[in-house]
Image (cartoon, rainbow, N blue to C red):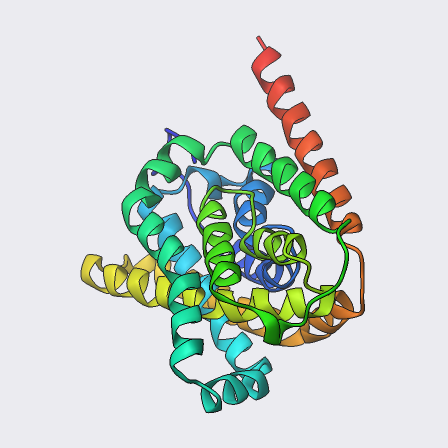
Amino acid sequence: MSPEGGRGKLTIGQALALGALHGPAELLPISSSGHVALVPWLLSWDYRLLDGELRKSFEVALHAGTAAALLITLRGEVVEAVGTLDRRRLALIALSFAPPAVAGYALERPIERRLGTPASIAAGLIAGAIAMALADRGPQLRRHEDAGARDALGLGIAQACALVPGVSRNGATLAAARLAGFTRADANRLSRHAALPVIAGATLLKGVRLRRRGLPAHARLPLAAGAAASFASTLGCTWLIRQVERDRSLLPYAAYRIALGIVVLARVRSKTMQP
C-alpha cells in the first residue's frame, strides 16, 4: 500500500489485533480487507511499510483462519449443501465462482497496485455502502431455494467487484441478492454459500504461492498469531451472523462504512496539505 514498502515490521501484538479484527469484519458487510489495510494506516503502524509480498502472506493467514472457523461454524449448512448437491446446484456454484476466479487471476495484481491506497479504499467503502442502502430498499419476496442461474451469475459478478479494496465481498453479494428480491435472511445465506468456495479457493491458491515463495523466519510467529486470532474471533462472533439475519436493515452498516470513508478521506486530505 506504500511505495516505501519493505521498511516496516509486523509485531505479534499487531498481528493479534488485526486477526481479532478480521473475524467480525469478515462476517459483517464492512470489508475485512479494507479494515486490515486502513487500521494500521490510521494508527501509523510500521505495518503499512511492510514488503508487499509479506503483507499478502499475512492476509492469506488471516483468511485461512477465518475460512477454517466458518467451516466449523457453518458445518450444518455445509453438510446440508453437500448432501443435496446435484447437477443444477453444481452449475449454480460454478456460475457464482467463475467471475471472481477469472477476475482475480487476471486482475489481482493490477488492482493491488492501483487501488490499494487509503483514498481508493475509502471510495470503495462509500460506493459499496450506497449500493447496499439502495438494494436493501427493495421488497423481500424470494427464498434462497428460488435462486437460479441469473442469481448465481449476479452473485459471482458481485464477488468479482469485491476485488476492489473496500467494496466487501459480503456487502456486494448481499446487495446483489437483495436487489434480486431475496429476503434479508435468505440474502445472507446466499452470500455465505457463494463466498465459502471463493474464500477457500483463494486461500488455497495463495497458500501454494506462499509455500513456493517461502516465508522469512522472523515472520512465521506473527503470521501464526494472526491466523489463530482470526480463527478465534470468527468462531467467537458466530452470533453476529444470526444478528444480521434477523431481518436487520443494511442501513447501519452502510452508514458506518460512509462515516469511515469520510474519516479516511479527511485524513488523506490533511496529509496532502501538510508542508
Residue 242 visible (yes or no): yes
* Image location (x, y in percent) of residue 253: 74, 50
Q: In which quarter of the image is residue 101?
A: bottom left
Q: Is residue 30 left or right of residue 91?
A: right
Rendering quarter of residue 244: bottom right
Q: In this view, does 130 lie above or below 271?
A: below
Image position of 139 with respect to 3: above or below: below
Q: Point out residue 78 in the picture as x, y percentages from the top left corner.
A: 51, 83
What residue sits 53% from the left and 71% below the top? 193
Query: Does residue 228 appear left or right of residue 263 in this picture?
Result: left
Q: Is residue 41 above or below residue 179?
A: above
Count of numbered circles on the image: 0
Along the viewing direction, whichever of 117 and 133 lies nearer the viewer: 133
Q: Where does the N terminus fall, quadrant-wise?
A: top left
Which residue lies most toward the left here? 212
Quadrant into which the C terminus falls: top right
Q: Nearer the viewer, residue 186 or 72?
A: 186
Residue at left offset 48%, top offset 76%: 68
Question: In the displayed structure, does residue 134 sit left or right of residue 127?
Answer: right
Residue 36 in percent (x, y) is at 54, 49
Residue 232 percent coordinates (x, y): 59, 74
Residue 66 shows up from this direction: no
Q: Residue at x 55, y 28 (%)?
A: 119
**Residue at the limit of the structure toward the top, as seen here:** 275
Residue at 62 percent across and 72 percent down: it is 144
